[in-house]
């Protein structure tokens, strides 16, 4: 029987479903006669999810259902899913005023029920899709994958129908093998009720594939709603230029999901893909790489790509990406500005070199500053988002002061209004060094459920351990109260008022030695 694949992107905020687009493109190239259809629940209003899924299945009658699940975690310092989950959690855990605690609890209840509601709704959609498709093909198979599945592949087993293939990381090779009827046991996957995920499966190296430009003429044929993403002209459409990240940042799982081996997509193919989107009116691109310039040795690849974009006559485009700003050169900075980079995120996590080293991030903060100066000199005048996650490992009042000094220097370079401090607290993820650290410190016990948002577990997973946890809790609550619309800047302002700032030199040097005694003394003095 020939295969008919229906790709169902499970409900998601409207982010371009680049994962299923790439999968369908690749399968279409390998199997030209294959019948495929993309169905994106991200473009469907919630009340219509069930009906729309039924209709898509009735119309297409697939015998292979590919479900793509993008995100599950909700610990973001922004609104959504019934409120600001970080704020509500902090109100419950740290507010002294019982009324605020109550408000947090009520809000938290809403967020928690929305979270579990969405989880069960998605599992329900998978089961429903399977039942419906069985009307047409008893032997229909279900495969699930995507970012959320890669992170939580071990936890979702219990909630999925028997026989579901659960995939970790990239799905191209797995789907190809499935369609060829080949053995899939060596792939990063398991089958619910038949096989178990291998120990440390996520750490297995993904198989490299040669990426070619996505054929958007083909995609438009198999995806009737493609134009939905072309209507808004401020929408950033995903384009992947490479896969993999060689770093070891203690809280990050990208480096295992995508693997440490960086695989560069040929620059000509990337440009050809952008060109097709450009011709359809797209002007904003998000390079969806874990890191656009993962290490120094990939600078030349980034230069080649940007030179080719520059030569392509797509002059009025903008692009954004996660950028390790320690890997820039003046030439690269010029090209970034020239090709229209108008937003980037630097995840330095802390402005203290000492902590950056302890978190195994491999950043040299002095180099980052120098490169930012080069970028400014090249004419970059847009917004840079700097991600700080306080209190990851061994934070002290001194390291907070250093972060303040560092941030103020970034403001000196780019301008206060151009540097957006995004204050996160890490949502602890499985298979990371930080998880290992939490086991060692007995904050978590092996066997905990990383998907749980029940208050007693969430308190540990929303990483903000004592002795500084309550202190940060109190500062953040004050920031939300004083200036909820500028939470990041307000938090830094309060911290500076309370603790002062270090000198920049202190921030940039990573002195060895134990500051814990100082921290204890300062905490006692504050209480
Ligand atoms: C780039 C990125 C962003 C960009 C997206 C920009 C854009 N316009 O596209 C920005 C910064 C906006 C972003 C935001 C968020 N993101 Co994000 N993001 C990523 C990142 C780095 C890459 C995603 C990507 O597009 N990759 C390229 C495409 C081609 O790969 P893909 O979609 O994963 O698809 C491949 C595989 O997953 C697989 N696959 C996909 N579906 C299926 C289905 C089957 C059956 C099979 C077999 C395989 C398969 O094959 C595909 C092709 O190889 C990932 C981390 C990572 N390294 O993967 C996180 C990630 C997807 N994000 C994540 C999250 C949580 C978020 C946020 C919700 C964060 C927050 N709390 O605010 C937000 C909001 C997103 C939203 N829906 O509104 C999580 C999701 C998992 C989770 N923890 O819940 C990830 C995995 C990071 C993480 N480890 O936590 N993100
Ligand atoms: S550089 Fe970024 S993507 Fe790479 S391991 Fe560190 S946090 Fe993760």
Image (cartoon, helix red, strand yellow):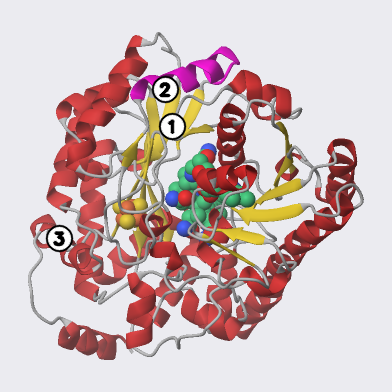
Q: Which residue is mark 3?
A: 507
What percent of the width, then of the height, locates residue 411? 27, 44
Report which quarter residue 370 is drawn in. top left
Q: Tell which tag, 1 or 3, sits nearer the viewer.
A: 1
Q: Is residue 421 left or right of residue 149?
A: left
- Which part of the image, by quadrant, shows the C terminus? bottom left
Relative placement, left or right, of 209 versus 54 is left
Q: Residues within 10 Å of mark 2 (few under 14, many from 20)?
A: some
Mark 2 lies on residue = 269
Residue at 69% in and 31% down: 34
For label 1, the residue is 211
Labels 2 and 1 touching (C-beta < 8 A): yes
The local secondary structure at tag 1 comes to loop
On screen, residue 441 above or below 414: below
How many neighbours does mark 3 have within 10 angstroms: few (below 14), some (14-19), or many (20 or more)?
Answer: many
Q: CB under 8 Å between callouts 1 and 3?
A: no
Q: Is residue 335 visible?
A: yes
Residue 345: percent from the left, percent from the top?
A: 37, 44
Residue at 88% x, 36% y: name it.
59
> Which quarter of the rendered picture does the N terminus lie within?
top right
Q: Which residues are magenta?
A: 267-282
């Amino acid at each position: 029987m020939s295969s008919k694949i229906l790709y169902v992107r499970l409900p998601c905020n409207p982010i371009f479903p680049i994962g299923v687009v790439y999968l369908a493109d690749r399968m279409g190239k390998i199997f030209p006669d294959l019948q495929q259809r993309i169905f994106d629940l991200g473009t469907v209003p919630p009340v219509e999810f069930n009906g729309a899924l039924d209709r898509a299945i009735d119309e297409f009658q697939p015998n292979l259902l590919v479900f793509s699940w993008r995100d599950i975690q909700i610990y973001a310092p922004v609104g959504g899913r019934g409120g600001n989950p970080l704020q509500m959690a902090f109100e419950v855990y740290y507010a002294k005023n019982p009324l605020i605690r109550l408000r947090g609890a009520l809000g938290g209840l809403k967020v928690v029920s929305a979270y579990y509601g969405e989880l069960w709704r998605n599992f329900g959609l998978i089961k429903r899709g399977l039942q419906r498709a069985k009307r047409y093909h008893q032997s229909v198979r279900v495969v699930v994958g995507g970012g959320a599945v890669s992170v939580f592949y071990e936890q979702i087993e219990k909630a999925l129908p028997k026989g579901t293939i659960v995939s970790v990381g990239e799905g191209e090779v797995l789907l190809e093998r499935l369609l060829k009827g080949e053995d899939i046991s060596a792939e990063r996957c398991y089958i619910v009720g038949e096989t178990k995920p291998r120990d440390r499966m996520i750490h297995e190296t993904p198989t490299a594939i040669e990426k070619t430009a996505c054929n958007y003429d083909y995609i438009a044929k198999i995806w009737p709603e493609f134009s939905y993403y072309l209507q808004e002209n401020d929408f950033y459409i995903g384009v992947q230029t490479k896969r993999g990240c060689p770093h070891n940042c203690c809280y990050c799982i990208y480096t295992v999901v995508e693997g440490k081996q960086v695989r560069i997509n040929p620059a000509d193919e990337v440009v050809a893909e952008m060109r097709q989107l450009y011709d359809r009116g797209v002007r904003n691109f998000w390079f969806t790489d874990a890191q656009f310039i993962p290490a120094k040795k990939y600078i030349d690849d980034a230069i080649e790509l940007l030179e080719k974009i520059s030569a392509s006559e797509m002059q009025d485009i903008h692009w954004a990406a996660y950028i390790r700003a320690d890997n820039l050169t003046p030439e690269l900075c010029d090209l970034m500005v020239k090709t229209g980079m108008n937003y980037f995120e630097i995840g330095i996590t802390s402005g203290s070199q000492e902590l950056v080293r302890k978190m195994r991030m491999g950043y040299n903060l002095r180099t980052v500053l120098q490169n930012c100066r080069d970028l400014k000199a090249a004419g970059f005048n847009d917004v840079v988002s700097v991600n700080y996650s306080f209190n990851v490992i061994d934070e002290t009042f001194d390291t907070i002061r250093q972060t303040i000094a560092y941030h103020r220097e970034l403001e000196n370079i780019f301008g206060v209004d151009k540097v957006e401090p995004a204050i996160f607290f890490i949502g602890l993820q499985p298979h990371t060094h930080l998880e290992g650290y939490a086991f060692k410190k007995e904050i978590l016990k092996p066997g905990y459920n990383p998907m749980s948002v029940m208050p007693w577990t969430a308190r540990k997973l929303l990483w903000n351990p004592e002795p500084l946890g309550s202190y940060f809790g109190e500062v953040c609550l004050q920031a939300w109260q004083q200036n909820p619309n500028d939470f990041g800047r307000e938090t830094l302002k309060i911290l500076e008022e309370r603790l002062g700032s270090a000198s920049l030199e202190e921030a940039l040097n990573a002195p060895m030695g134990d500051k814990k005694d100082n921290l204890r003394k300062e905490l006692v003095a504050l209480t």
